[in-house]
Image (spheres, grey):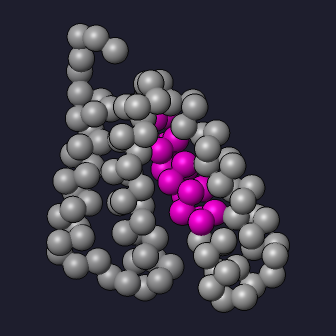
Amino acid sequence: MLIAKSITLFILAGLCEIGGGYLVWIWLRENRSLWFAGAGAIILIIYGIIPTFQPAHFGRVYAAYGGIFVVLSILWGWEIDKIVPDRYGMIEGLIRLLGVSIIMYWPRNVN
């Protein structure tokens, strides 16, 4: 149950970071309303709060989160920007998820 909660928090944080950044991106790049920037900023603040609920220490959480971020970014690009990842992007994503699994969930004697 702890792993499921942790993975859910990673995904939620990733969606907030990418989504908030995306709103700021389109505000600047597509001359959208200032509301996009404001909403993006609020979502980015929420992103900064979510990882504090992870069961591990800061360094481990953020190292593992980097892998989650890459995978979610590939998926975001695929769904939102309609950029289909090539096989190298897919391989990279799988390698990063393996790294996340090791750094966060591999059994340890010391925390």
Residue nearer the viewer, 1 or 54? 54
Residue 107: horizontal and vertical position, in percent?
23, 21
Q: Residue at x 61, y 76 (%)?
A: 25
How would you classify the magenta stretch by its main secondary structure?
helix
The reply to whether the magenta stretch includes residue 7 is yes
The reply to whether the magenta stretch includes residue 102 is no
Q: Which residues are magenta?
A: 5-21
Going by the image, does 57 lie left or right of 63?
right
- Say if 15 sits above or below 3 in the image: below
Residue 1: horizontal and vertical position, in percent?
43, 27
Q: Residue furthest bottom?
A: 30
Identify the image quadrant of residue 64. Answer: top left
Going by the image, does 76 lie left or right of 38?
left
Q: Residue at x 34, y 15 (%)?
A: 111
Residue 13: horizontal and vertical position, in percent?
54, 48
Q: Residue at x 69, y 49 (%)?
A: 45
Residue 56: horizontal and vertical position, in percent?
43, 24
| Residue 4 in sight here | no
Going by the image, does 33 lie left or right of 11?
right
Q: How many marks?
A: 0
- Say if 62 sits above or below 86 in the image: above
| Residue 22 in sight here | yes
Identify the image quadrant of residue 4. Answer: top left
- Say if 34 sits above or below 18 in the image: below
Q: Residue furthest front?
A: 28
Q: Residue at x 52, y 41 (%)?
A: 9
